[in-house]
Image (tube, rainbow, N blue to C red):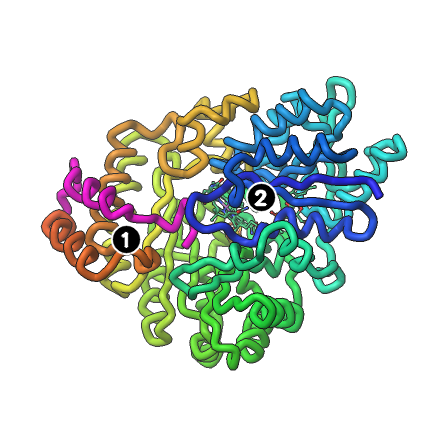
Amino acid sequence: MQKVLLFNPRSNNHLARIPNSVLQVAASIQGKYDWVIVDGNLEDAPHQKILDYLKADDFKFFGCTVMPGPQLRQAIPITKLVREKFPAVKIIWGGYFASNQNKSVMLSGFVDAIVNGPGDFAFPKLLDAFENNLPLENISNLIFKKGNEIVTTKKDALHEQDTLPDLPYEKLNSFYPLQKYLGKSYLGTKTIAYHSSFGCPFTCSFCAVVPIYEAKWKGQSAEKIYRNIKLLKEKFGGNAIEFHDNNFFVSEKRTVEFARLIKNENMIWWGEARIDTLDKYSDESLALMRDAGCRMIFFGAETGNDEVLKKMDKGGKQSGAQILSFAARMKKFNIIPEYSFVLGTPADTPEKVMQQIDGDIAFITKVKEANPATEIIIYVYSPVPTEGSDMYKQVLASGFRFPEKLEDWLAPAWEKFDLRKNPLTLWLTVEMVDKIQNFETVLNGYYPTITDIKLNSSRRKLLRTISSLRFKTGYHKYPYEIKALQKVFKYRQPETEGF
Ligand code: B12
Ligand code: SF4
């Protein structure tokens, strides 16, 4: 059997999670190709480990998963190294960065093909084609170079998720003890990362899921999720779940079925949802979810500004009023809403951009009044290539361009862009970015996230006390004292590192 090396570059400094991307790719070739996984999150020198593997054995393929941001720090130099030292090895990238920024990846010259979206059928077919020198044009979900042209093949419909193979947890356990992936988080002492669906049925104009999944969603059945969770619980001791789906709660029926199944397992769980979808759930469903262990849900609230919500194409159903009333509704069920906001979206004039930012800051303060337990996540808008959307047209009209050279993504400024903290968008002035970040600092000072489990109650109290005057008076400028304290306490923000 030919050998495939799958690499998960480091994405996180704290908690290694089950590397679902490479694991699912491995499942797709199980039995047909021999595979190994190298996980940058659990290696001090992953490049050495990779070179050792490639030297020791006759590997034909190197596959790497890449999301935007810090994963690029290992993905780019290590892939380059593999190409230099082992030019005969075919290199395949997949994941959100590879798909959405495919031009710079293909032009780099060190990636032979990209799996564009789900790799479950595309990857084994691609390997077979490379093996037998067959053309790639007829394989769906691929991007590759033919001469000077970048070819993108058609996308397959999303697969029935229950027909896909289960993830090879046992074999992963032979490379890295699975225990290392079940970390301590706000949710539990051994947190399972589980991904139960692909895509999302909506087309928000700022979202990286849209160009890949084109408003499609397919989920595993509640039974399949439950069976796998039970295995991870019984075999490896998992006691909490973070669902990594883009939109776990699309189907109320599936959620309710899952809640009924998981109820007696005594596990805390978290997932991502839309406010308008969940607001349609009945009181009974929400109460059952809480009883079944759902303690917090992440929602893309985005903004309280109805005009901007429309431009973001949030489906046209979500409104500022609903965001507020839903936060209050969640109080009744004791489920914490984790609201994510995207500030700094484009507008026709700089004054309007500033007004939008001021409006959002005031709105977030109102959300906290409606339900003080609401967790707030603040992102600065970083464009993704949602071709054809009004928002992206406005972005291009402003003169914004993504880097053309792959290595340019490693520049600190583009890394910050990826982390959605300080984008290089031309309509945002330093003053605007400072305003957003200073507000975030003060807000996190006055309301430290409960997901930072290392922050004890006396530290929380101290942070709150020193931030109180600023929060109450709305004076956010130069919050150095709060920043210094957050640094000393190693305050951890869930938006960049997860829980
Ligand atoms: C888990 C996760 C993380 C974890 C780390 C994951 C890890 N690998 O260790 C943490 C919390 C650290 C994280 C951080 C960030 N993340 Co993140 N993350 C995710 C999340 C929720 C799940 C990824 C996953 O495991 N999916 C499950 C697998 C099975 O699906 P998949 O990756 O799509 O894989 C399939 C295909 O893409 C393809 N494929 C993927 N890789 C490969 C490789 C090969 C060789 C092949 C052939 C095929 C292939 O085949 C797979 C099977 O069909 C996704 C959202 C999502 N639902 O996918 C966001 C997501 C990828 N993250 C995102 C972002 C932006 C980030 C951050 C940069 C910033 C932020 N502010 O959130 C940070 C920084 C990342 C870093 N440090 O490098 C965005 C990317 C958006 C974009 N612009 O492209 C996503 C899409 C979330 C979102 N909706 O915005 N993230
Ligand atoms: S609902 Fe969420 S995942 Fe779906 S398109 Fe909108 S932002 Fe993206």
Residue shown at 20% from the left, 47% from the top = 442
Find residue 125 and report its horizontal and vertical position in percent.
82, 42
Find residue 342 and report its horizontal and vertical position in percent.
38, 45
Quarter of the picture containing the C terminus is: bottom left
Q: Nearer the viewer, mark 2 or mark 1?
A: 2
- Which residue is most to the top? 148
Mark closest to the chain's N terminus, 2 or 1: 2
Quarter of the picture containing the N terminus is: top right
Residue shown at 21% from the left, 57% from the top = 460
Secondary structure at numbered mark 1: helix
- Alpha carbon separation for disc pair 2 and 1: 38 Å
Numbered range of the magenta stretch:
474-499
Find residue 110 and report its horizontal and vertical position in percent.
67, 24
Find residue 449 and report its horizontal and vertical position in percent.
30, 56
Residue 485 lies in the magenta stretch: yes
In the picture shown, does residue 218 fall above or below 211?
A: below
- Which residue corresponds to mark 2? 39
* Three-letter residue code for mark 2: Asp
Residue shown at 67% from the left, 59% from the top = 170
Report the front residue among 345 and 30: 30
Secondary structure at numbered mark 2: strand
- Which residue corresponds to mark 1? 364
